[in-house]
Amino acid sequence: SENKVKKNPIKAVLDLFSESMSPILEPIIAAGMLAGVLSLLSLTGIISAESPTYILLDNIRSSVFFFLPIFMAMSCAKRLNASPFLAVALAATLLSTGINGVEGLSFFGIALPTTTYSNSFIPIILAVWFMGYVQKSLKKVLPKFICLPITLMFFGPIGEWIGSAMSWVCMFLMNTLGNWSVIALYAAVQPFLIMFGAGNFIIPIVVQFHAELGYDPIFYAACTISDIAVAGAMLGYFLRAKNEKQKQLFGTFSFSALMGVTEPAIYGAFVKFRKLFLAVAIGGGLGGLYAGIANVKTYAMAWGLAGLPSYIGNNDYKNFYSMIIAVIIGFVAAAVAAYFLGIPKDSEKAEASDEKAVSSKSDDSIMNKVVVNGCATGKLVKLSEINDKAFSSGALGSGVGIIADNNLVVAPVDGEVICVFPTKHAFGLKTESGVELLIHIGIDTVELEGKHFTTMVNQGDKVKI
């Protein structure tokens, strides 16, 4: 194990979000691109939003975000030393029709808050983090049964609590400062709320506005301004990025956000590049401030580019033009802010070194092949047949198992001993060409703490086959 470096707790949490999100970017990007294409097809009239083709394709898009907790559970479990299979089972349970968004649930007489787990990832990350600790003490199925009620009672409602707090803040500002303050605030902080799955609190308020006033004076305008500010921020990073891989990523995220789908940008870029939150706070806040001062009204429950025509309402073209100006302010201000805030240099260097490493590996792949001899005599078995999930699942890489018929383990390659575990049950070897191998003796042998083992080598020694 590497020496653990103490981190700022907030940075450690955000790093966990970022690292867990990176492996699942492919389906998220695909869903975002599909949503953008569907929006264009709908806007141009090529496909009706009510057509079976549109509905089918839109379900492909929405399913990725609906089942986001399952993707996150698998990815997060690998980073927190929890069983990925138990984590996925827990996520699937939370998304079941008997729990997800269901009212009136209770556990041994304890009332549970109504919580929607789909399209969110905060609850499952907390649950998997907790499961990692539980699993150290209890094996197999028990962690799920312990973690599920804890998640339902504590971790799940976190997004709801944040939403309720935001609702109280918004109503307080409306009654004291005026509507303009809430539009500016919500447009500035919406990416945070999406990340925490706490944006649903606005829907009942919007419905009430439409019932009483016939329009929404605050939230849907703020949503649209914020979404397009996200697109602007991603455009700013697209223009600033020098790395080709980052350019492609930021360009894709900007397009999908412009079409009204900001999750790819927020989950895939904002969590990793935290300055983007500030860029949207600047752009969204300024655009929202203008919309509030201009008293913009949303006459239909729609947001994004497709919803802009609804601001005309009953021939209220002044309202429409004011909204267009607010959106442009948000987009341009966020793009400029993101461009000048800049991309962390270490991330660009990391991307460049990764590309160089991949290029080097592909060019010299023949030279990196190494023939591995046996490290013990006995019966050869498939890695998947070994009763240890860390090895059998392939999480630690490819390999084989040997049921040894004697007590001697030898070097299978020429190289250097780069690691000797203190418990003497595992060794790391590295060949001259850079290939690393792990030799692990026994199952759960770490618990013997070195008893019954005799080590013939030390770290740094050179060995021959």
Image: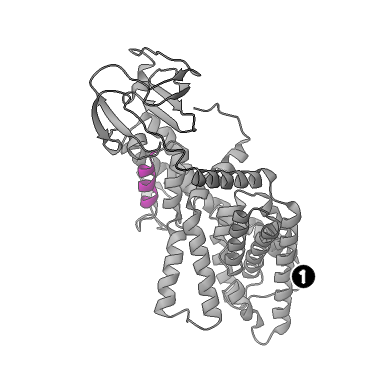
Q: Helix or strand or loop: what does disc 1 sit on? A: helix
| Relative horizontal placement of residue 441, taking residue 276 as reference (left or right) | left
Farthest residue to the front: give it.
367
Q: How many marks?
A: 1
Give the side of residue 429 with respect to residue 98, left or right: right
- Residue 189: image quadrant is bottom right
- Above-or-below relation of 199 to 430: below
The amino acid at mark 1 is Ile
Q: Nearer the viewer, residue 105 or 352?
A: 352
Question: How many neighbours does mark 1 have within 10 angstroms: few (below 14), some (14-19), or many (20 or more)?
Answer: some
Residue, far bottom: 315
User: Is residue 267 shown left or right of residue 442?
Assistant: right
- Spot occupied by residue 187 in the image (x, y as percentages of width and height): 67, 62
- Residue depicted at 48% across the width and 81% down the height: 47
Residue 87 on the magenta span: yes
Residue at 34% across, 22% down: 445
Q: Which residues are magenta?
A: 83-93
Query: Can residue 404 be spotted in the picture?
Result: yes
Where is 271 relative to 47, above or below?
A: above
Give above or below for 322 relative to 152: below
Residue in front for this viewpoint, 463 or 366:
366
Judge left or right: residue 117 versus residue 165.
Answer: left
**44 to 146, vertically: above or below:** below
Residue 298 drawn at (x, y percent): 63, 75
The residue sitting at 58% across, 58% down in the picture is: 249
Name the chief secondary structure element in magenta.
Answer: helix
Q: Quadrant of the C terminus?
A: top left
